[in-house]
Image: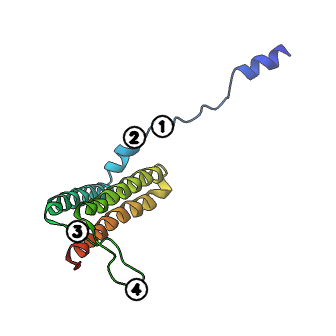
Amino acid sequence: MDSIQHAIEMGSLTPASPQSIYPSFVLVQAWESPLARYLWLAGIFLNLGLLVWVSLMIPGLRQVPLGFLPSGEPSPAVPGVGLILLPALSIGLFIFGWVTGLFFYRSRERHTLAEIVWGGGVLSTLLFLLAVMFVITTPI
């Protein structure tokens, strides 16, 4: 009985391969990918541009329509400061997609899925830019 207990306490005969799961290494690995780096930087600069553009436009806007009625007409206008909602939503969506992409990027089989998610973040920011342009040009 003592020799069996001693053999159990010696551990496994084959050593386990080391594996690191620290998030900082995922960031470094993803940053080394040119496509991921481009998508991250494009999303950051587009979101910053959207935020600056809307921040500069707000003082000149009295009211803006931010929705549509079921009949297709613009909804009643809200104060111009309500337009800051669009960049805030865009930044929040981009950050959520960035974190989700990092989660997918941990597995080598899901690198493509992570890049699709990051590309979707850039596309959604472009759509928010288009939405701001549409809201500003829509008559009240």
Q: What is the distance, in whole Å, between disc 2 and disc 4 at their CAs?
A: 52 Å
Q: Which residue is mark 3?
A: 63
- Tell me the kind of residue under disc 2: Phe
Q: Position of residue 133 (x, y in %)?
A: 22, 73
The numbered mark at residue 76 is none
SS type, badge 4 = loop
Q: Is residue 62 left or right of residue 23?
A: left
Q: Tell me if I can see residue 72 in this picture.
A: yes
Q: Residue at x 32, y 74 (%)?
A: 76
The numbered mark at residue 71 is 4
Q: Residue at x 30, y 67 (%)?
A: 128
Q: Residue at x 31, y 63 (%)?
A: 122
Q: Is residue 123 left or right of residue 16?
A: left
Residue 133 against residue 113 in the figure, above or below = below
- Tell me the kind of residue under disc 1: Ser
- Tell me the kind of residue under disc 4: Ser
Camera-nearest residue between 83 and 25: 83
